């Protein structure tokens, strides 16, 4: 056996409730992996973070399946990517732990971001809440200097959400503030076109997943007729085979896809999505999916290799009260990595779990 792989479960606690149209998150279950090379004692750390009722591999026997994959990888020394296509969060944890092990560094790749000389532009995320909460959060993001704001919509009255967008546009033009909205599939198919027409008044960059995933013909029609771009997110979940990915993109023809490695095939699967999208003239951006700083850093370091120009969705790592300290910082509207800062104390953090 070349490697030892330890699985460390952890429940993380949100600083404030994270609301989407699917419900409100107060805690977050993750499984950390520590992969140790038995030849030299070096180790790497990864994070498996499935989202309940969303991830295609969120299942009652998750811990048992993860343990079997880890045992197999520990014995063979190799990740079986084909066998793990349907288990994206497990694959992401393993492949990023090995990346950390092999590079011996948190920067994972040699990029300006990893070297601390450039930040990655990110959007300011406004979680769902009541009108007053969302209004206050929007004001805070604006004061911090964000030039792209993303609003989660679908939980309060649609007219109230339009009011929030009106407030932003009354003070900031589309050149000053880029606006994205994420419906998380909240629109009924029969009302989606009307709501998109109403939203168009506010000169939005895009809307994510206006209707529930799995309605390809409905989404195809919306993408063809919407007055502004549509980005697919949940639609990609569970679409793991290459042939099926091609079918989805060729049928729906979205303007953008959003890549969350923990949900959409790990780093390997996300690269495949990008290749297929680029062949079809479809844009993309990368976002995290409520991982702690261990997972967020792995996503950000990979994202930096793509040399992104548009804002990415990487501002979620500071959401937890019991996160591990990482040299990641949001400065203005960018995520920065400071390699000169002290390396996290992984042994202590993982032992306290």
Image: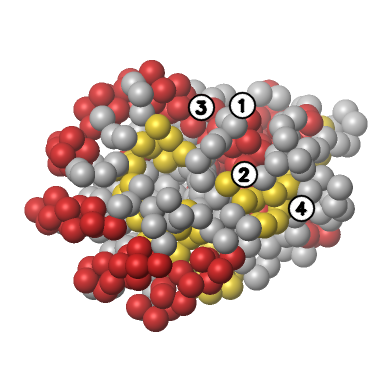
Which residue is the site of mark 3? 271
- In the rendered structure, are the residues bearing label 3 and label 1 in contact, judged by CB atoms less than 8 Å apart? no
- Residue 79: which disc? 1
Choose between 151 and 351: the one closer to the eye: 151
- In the rendered structure, are the residues bearing label 4 and label 1 in contact, judged by CB atoms less than 8 Å apart? no
CA–CA distance in space, label 3 to label 2: 19 Å
Which residue is the site of mark 2? 120
In terms of secondary structure, where does tag 4 sit? loop
- Residue 327: which disc? 4
Image location (x, y in percent) of residue 140: 53, 71
Q: As drawn, is 68 to the left or to the right of 40? A: left
CA–CA distance in space, label 3 to label 1: 16 Å
Image location (x, y in percent) of residue 350: 76, 57
- In the rendered structure, are the residues bearing label 2 and label 4 in contact, judged by CB atoms less than 8 Å apart? no
Chain-order first, disc 4 or disc 3: 3
Which residue: 35% across, 78% down? Answer: 131
Chain-order first, disc 3 or disc 2: 2
| Crowd tier of the residue under label 3, counting other residues whose Cα lies within 10 Å: few below 14, some 14–19, many 20 or above | some
CA–CA distance in space, label 2 to label 4: 14 Å
């Amino acid at each position: 056996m070349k490697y030892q792989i330890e699985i460390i479960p952890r429940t993380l606690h949100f600083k404030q409730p994270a609301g989407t149209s699917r419900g409100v998150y107060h805690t977050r279950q993750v499984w950390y992996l520590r992969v140790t090379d038995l030849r030299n004692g070096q180790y790497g750390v990864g994070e498996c973070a499935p989202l309940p009722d969303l991830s295609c591999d969120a299942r009652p026997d998750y811990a048992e399946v993860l343990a079997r994959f880890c045992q197999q990888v520990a014995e063979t020394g190799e990740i079986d990517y084909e066998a793990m296509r349907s288990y994206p969060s497990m694959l992401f944890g393993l492949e990023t732990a090995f990346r950390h092990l092999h590079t011996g560094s948190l920067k994972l790749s040699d990029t300006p971001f990893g070297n601390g000389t450039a930040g990655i532009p990110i959007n300011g995320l406004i979680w769902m809440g009541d009108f007053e909460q969302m209004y206050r959060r929007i004001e805070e993001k604006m004061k911090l200097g964000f030039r792209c704001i993303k609003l989660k919509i679908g939980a309060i009255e649609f007219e109230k959400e339009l009011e929030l967008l009106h407030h932003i546009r009354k003070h900031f033009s589309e050149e000053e503030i880029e606006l994205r909205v994420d419906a998380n599939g909240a629109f009924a198919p029969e009302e989606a076109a009307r709501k998109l027409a109403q939203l168009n008044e506010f000169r939005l960059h895009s809307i994510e997943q206006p209707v529930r995933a799995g309605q390809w013909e409905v989404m195809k029609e919306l993408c063809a007729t919407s007055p502004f771009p549509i980005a697919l997110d949940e639609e990609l979940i569970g679409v793991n085979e290459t042939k099926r990915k091609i079918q989805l993109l060729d049928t729906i023809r979205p303007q953008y896809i959003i890549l969350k490695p923990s949900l959409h095939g790990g780093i390997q699967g996300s690269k495949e999505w990008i290749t297929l999208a680029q062949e079809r003239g479809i844009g993309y951006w990368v976002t995290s999916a409520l991982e702690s700083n261990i997972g967020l850093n792995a996503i950000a370091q990979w994202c930096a290799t793509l040399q992104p120009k548009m804002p990415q969705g990487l501002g979620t790592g500071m959401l937890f009260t019991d996160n591990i300290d990482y040299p990641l910082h949001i400065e203005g509207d960018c995520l920065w990595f400071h390699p000169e800062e002290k390396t996290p104390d992984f042994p202590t953090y993982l032992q306290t779990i």
